[in-house]
Amino acid sequence: MPAAAWIPNERYLERSRLRRFAEANGHRDSDALSAWSITDLDAFWRAVERDLRLVWRTAYRSVLDASAGVPWTKWWIGGRLNYVASAIQHEPSRTAILWEGEDGATRRLTYAELASEVRRFAAGLRAIGVSTGDRVGIFMPLTPECAIATLAVSAIGAIYTPIFSGYAADAIAGRLRDAEASVLITADGFYRRGQLVPMKETADAAADAAPSVTQVIVTERVARRVSMREGRDLTWDEVVRRGVGADETFADTAAEDPYMIIYTSGTTGRPKGAVHVHGGFPVKAAQDMAHCFDLQAGDVMWWFTDLGWMMGPWLIAGGLILGATIVLYDGTPDFPDASRLWAMVERHRVTHLGISPTAIRSLMRSGEEPVRKHDRSSLFVLGSTGEPWNPEPWWWYHRIVGEGRAPIINYSGGTEVSGGILGCTTWTAIQPAAFSGPVPGIAADVIDERGRSVRGAVGELAIRKPWPGMTRGFWKDPDRYLATYWSRVPDVWVHGDWARVDAAGFWYIEGRSDDTLKIAGKRVGPAEVESAAVAHPAVLEAAAVGVPHEIKGESIVVFCVLRPNATASDGLAQEVQDKVAELLGKPLRPETVRFVTQLPKTRNAKVLRRVIRGAFLGKSDLGDLSALENPAAVDEIRGLSEPAKGSVA
């Protein structure tokens, strides 16, 4: 077994919140804690909610009830909890939110100021007729008002739907119609790569296509004149004025009352609306931040995200429940230049930084100098999620960004999970691109097609016991929820990722199971092929997909983005093929390597392999493309005819 890439020193061990939590409950090591967390759900989750200092209006009678079936497990039975009370209870003078806009504008809110803003806007929402159970779409850049809106909607017992700030009107309208939202909260616009994004006009078109929407609330972000429709549109300030003297108290919600419907894109059909409750997603988010990332009161966490990606609501709810300072940013990480992200780390003294592996690979193009010229001594933890790692960018993030001292907390789960299934901790050793194991409280396993545990081989990532953050189903579609996660193995959540556990006990995600390649009977995850391809010094990024093959059934095509000093050629394509064969074996040698200038990605930097495959094969229906950031990448791949072996673009 190779030496660990990072081992906690005394500073990390002494500070570790997870270690203190374990010892307070009679467990001296992480293995004992992990076993307890999944064998005694009642005791573990009671200890978690006490550790998080959740604010209960009425105490719960029991922790969980699975009498309706494991997929429909309920939590905190009899308890009444509005999670917003837990999120604003902290030292009034402590900074709650640090915001920076791409244009350089900044703003700071203390917990006292945040609480006041939330109560005022909540009163205003009540005054204009928003009530318990109403659905409210939030289509905003990640500004202080965005966070305030999520909290205020929840405070009055309404249900919000976070919507990606880059969506077009049709994608927004589809979500508003499905949720039957009566209100849409938006902004006049925001800046992206220095260009104005006219958000209000997009919101208007979406609201026009969603008959349930009767009110649109507009906050000022860029101070531009926008059209306001009489009888429907209200400014943010007007809503606040209407709430003066109105009820500012928080709704008396049960722990199982919904507070959010968050939509996830699918390969086909309409997006799925995952329903989350006050005692679910916020509790899981805060627990993961505390146990995996060691986030504590006064720390400064910045996760590069958007409200429409689950990490946006995760950052807001979890970070505030823990009393941390959360950094919100509504721009790109490399504008006006590649040092922007690192300058913000220095400027705001960020302690916990989260970013996707794909974003790191992109930032690597600019070299080390933009990173090294900024002070990163404040960084205590580096976080990552969204995609499997390749070793080289993992080491770059660890050694260059984290100076070899800050651990990378690799974290993987999903929107319907409310956070992580697998993760690392600051209490345990870390290996490159790996997970130390399941997040405490998650009974994760790797299983074969019959539901049997497997080790040392690739299988399906599964969860064998319920947890508070599990979605309470898909909005208006319980059958789809059961079919998606519970239909394969009785009472076992099958997540849709390929995973494996090595001999040393480290876990790895090998990609989505619907992305899996099966070459001459051998199953391989695309991440494994991609890691082998980027091991070639000329390759910066890669995406591997399978295409039909007369003999093998399926063959591998690798799409590569080259480093700036590399030039595409037939010879280089063959070298990349040879490198994959060298590292994975000749049977997995790619049939073809194609060079492209960019890979199709979502704004949160996930590579859309299903889109790559469909575009390359000339399919007209590529599924849901609403999250696609760069349509030109799809056009580039469409322009490539199905290649012969070894050809290049």
Image (cartoon, rainbow, N blue to C red):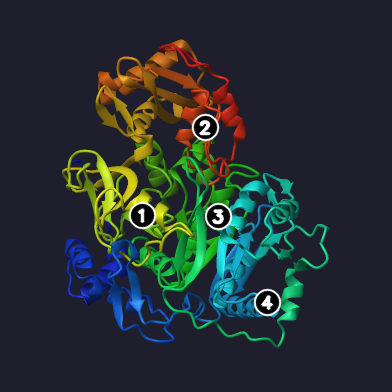
| Disc 4 from disc 3: Cα separation | 25 Å
**The one of 174 and 406 positioned closer to us in this rendering:** 174
Task: Confirm whether residue 167 shows in the render.
Answer: no
Q: Amino acid at mark 3?
A: Gly
Reading the image, the residue beneath label 4 is 129
Q: Residue at x 61, y 57 (%)?
A: 176
Callout 1 crowding tier (Cα within 10 Å): few <14, some 14–19, many ≥20: some
- Please tell me which of labels 3 and 2 falls first in the chain: 3
Tell us which disc is closer to us: 4 or 3.
4
| Disc 4 from disc 1: Cα separation | 35 Å
Asked if residue 596 is positioned above or below residue 59 in the image, the reply reads: above
In the structure shown, which secondary structural element does the residue marked by tag 3 occupy? loop
**Residue 596 horizontal side relative to residue 502, left or right:** right
Q: Amino acid at mark 2?
A: Leu
Q: Residue lying at the far front in this picture: please name it.
A: 479
Reading the image, the residue beneath label 2 is 599
**The one of 451 and 155 positioned closer to us in this rendering:** 451
Reading the image, the residue beneath label 1 is 482
Q: Amino acid at mark 4?
A: Gly
